[in-house]
Amino acid sequence: MPALSTGSGSDTGLYELLAALPAQLQPHVDSQEDLTFLWDMFGEKSLHSLVKIHEKLHYYEKQNPMPILHGAAALADDALLSVHDTVAQKNYDPVLPPMPDDIDEEEDSVKIIRLVKNREPLGATIKRDEHTGAIVVARIMRGGAADRSGLIHVGDELREVNGIPVDDKKPEEIIHILAQSQGAITFKIIPSVKEEMPMKEGKMFIRALFDYDPNEDKAIPCKEAGLAFRKGDVLQIMSQDDATWWQAKHEGDANPRAGLIPSKHFQERRFALRRPEVQVQPLKISNRKSSGFRRSFRLSRKDKKTNKSMYECKKSDQYDTADIPTYEEVAKYRRQPNEKYRLVVLVGPVGVGLNELKRKLLISDTQHYGVTVPHTTRPRRSQESDGVEYIFISKHLFETDVQNNKFIEYGEYKNNYYGTSLDSVRSVLAKNKVCLLDVQPHTVKHLRTYEFKPFVIFIKPPSLDRLRETRKNAKIISSKDDKGTAKPFTEEDFHEMIKSAHVMESQYGHLFDKVIVNDDLATAYSELKTTFDRLETETFWVPVSWLHS
């Protein structure tokens, strides 16, 4: 075999030598097959890796390495035996440092806790114990930093925060110290001897019927721990341990931390105490007619004896509490194909265009939408048919039905009764139609039952300027019966419409599921139609009692 060239340097590595070998052997190889074999063999990655390891070890050996300690071998033997003894005795506990010599003998139960706090609140509130004067943990917010640590509990006595004694400080001062602290916070506490019940995540959901801002609540124990919400928001209740302050979070919120909200009982009490007696002007609502379409029954409220809501349904959730709206427990509901459609209740002031929107819905699909036929005791006219314009009944029968609470609303006009009955609603629903019911807002709370599951839509007027612009060529029919003449809107009509809408929304807005501003009729109709389509196919939050009778 010919001699192999080793390159120019005497310290050329074995790796370079093997890499150059196939090229140097090429003139002496007879066949291409043998040459390919040589390239494959000397180009093998695993061979190159072994050669590199060999070179590293060879280089390290030249450095003549020495152990740090001369007795390294004996030290390794001792370490191995120590590990053996530890495993054999299963003695894995860490060795704790000795207790300080200057610790108070009465503080033998003191616990030092270190939590890492970022920008989120600590998730605990404190108070001064009325009997001992000590600063104690009042509550632990579910999902907060303190709750997740599992180290701080309700009733624990707080002695120091980051080395600062808190015995002589007010809770507000301590909260300020905590709020200013970032990163690791060290607590010195005396654990409570009271055992806590294991905390379970709440599965109760409520709909808020009022707006709430903890920063404006003087009664809340800790504003930073409060949860703000708007009317209509759905909240998940995490704890009701405190009768005054519940813990809750917004439904669907990925943040697990709960916040404080006033309890239902506490909020009802506050509302009852601070609400003055409000003298509400009666709504001037009359029966209208538009383009040959007969509107549902509505009468003036000037005289309570002539306009009443007689459907006293004890199953209504809001019957007793609607005047003090706080929360209502809700659950998810989706209409099943074999169920009757939900009753749709339309509410709005006179002249807002509610009639026109309802007429467009009916025309769009007469087989899918329907309206109730009012009852009356007045004589039938020649061009009228019983059960079409009205259901004509005797005065005696009408009064008997009133006594039996069969009317949703009823009233008297020119010595004749008019009314919308429960059976007229049931008749539309029984035909597998969506019933469009137009009633006064104070009647809504009586209809919120398992039977009807109403969806309430408030048709709201736009601004005064837009009313002047969009209604300048429109007309209003003010008569309570069918002989009324149309007249143009007046400035007084516009002001009355906005005023009535404000009263409706402020007093009954918590009962409205949807608010549509009728700025432009086509746009409002499109929004209304989209709402109806969603109502029949999607899931909605409804009072929990609607899921079972």
Image (tube, grey):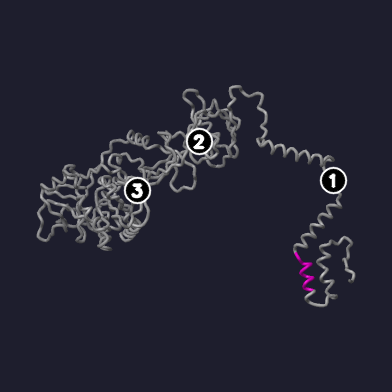
In the image, residue 36 lies in the stretch drawn in magenta: yes
Q: CA distance from mark 1 to mark 3?
A: 80 Å
For the view shown, which residue lies furthest in the front direction?
88
Point out the frontmost of discs 3 and 2. Answer: 3
Which residue is label 1 attached to? 66
Q: What is the three-letter code of the residue carrying label 3?
A: Val
Instruction: List x then y, in percent, for residue 240.
Output: 42, 37
Q: Is mark 3 in CB contact (under 8 Å) with mark 2?
A: no
Instruction: List x then y, in percent, for residue 200.
Output: 46, 40
Which residue is label 2 attached to? 124
Q: State the image quarter where residue 292 is shown.
A: bottom left
Q: Which mark is residue 486?
A: none
Q: Earlier in the sequence, mark 1 or mark 2?
A: 1
Q: Earlier in the sequence, mark 3 or mark 2?
A: 2
Q: Residues within 10 Å of mark 1 (few under 14, many from 20)?
A: few
Q: State the image quarter where residue 188 is shown.
A: top right
Identify whether 100 is placed above or below 517: above
Q: Residue at x 49, y 48 (%)?
A: 254
Instruction: List x then y, in percent, for residue 443.
Output: 25, 46
Q: Is residue 36 visible?
A: yes
Magenta-tinted stretch: 35-44
Which residue is label 3 attached to? 542
